[in-house]
Amino acid sequence: MVYAPLPALYCEMFPTSVRYSGISIGYQMASILLASFTPALASAMVLWADGSLWMVIAFVIVTTLIAMAAISFAPDRRDRELNEIGAIPKHADDAPALPSR
């Protein structure tokens, strides 16, 4: 349920010319900065709270609220076409050629 709407959201956030890099950089940086430290952080919270899970639950609630706030500030583009967000070539002849090896 969480990952299903993400591709549509990401496509609406970035124009076609930078979509792959924009999505990748944002997704990977979030993984590095938060997800990689979460198991160690959760273990430390449980130890600090003498075996109780209330700190971990509070952490999950706070990160969920931060994510909801971030999504609420994302621009609403539901009535726009993707080609209005970024230029999409209509024909293969119009598409820029990729460099060969």
Image (cartoon, rainbow, N blue to C red):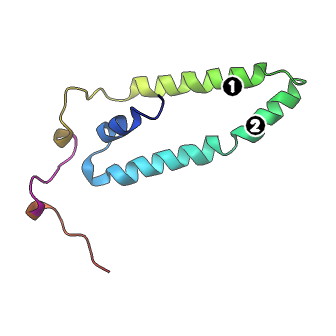
Q: Nearer the viewer, residue 91 or 13?
A: 91
Res 80 quadrant in image: top left
Residue 59's tag is 1
Res 49 quadrant in image: top right
Total labels: the figure holds 2
Question: What segment is highlighted magenta in the picture?
Answer: 85-92
What's the residue type where badge 1 is placed? Answer: Phe
Res 31 quadrant in image: top right
On the image, the x and y values in percent for residue 97 come to 19, 69
Question: Magenta stretch: residue 86 in it?
Answer: yes
Specify whether 30 is left or right of 51.
Answer: left
On the image, the x and y values in percent for residue 33 come to 61, 45
Specify whether 32 is left or right of 59.
Answer: left
Which residue corresponds to the image point at 27% horizontal and 46% vertical from the top-left?
A: 15
Which residue corresponds to the image point at 54% horizontal and 48% vertical from the top-left?
A: 29
**Marks 2 and 1: CB-CB under 8 Å?**
yes
Q: Quadrant of the C terminus?
A: bottom left
Q: For mark 2, what is the residue?
A: 41
Query: Between marks 2 and 1, how big is the CA–CA gap?
Result: 10 Å
Which residue corresponds to the image point at 17% horizontal and 50% vertical from the top-left?
A: 88
Label 2: element kind: helix
Q: Residues within 10 Å of mark 1 (few under 14, many from 20)?
A: some
Question: Magenta stretch: residue 15 in it?
Answer: no
Q: Nearer the viewer, residue 91 or 63?
A: 91
Q: Nearer the viewer, residue 73 or 38?
A: 38
Q: Main secondary structure of the magenta part?
A: loop
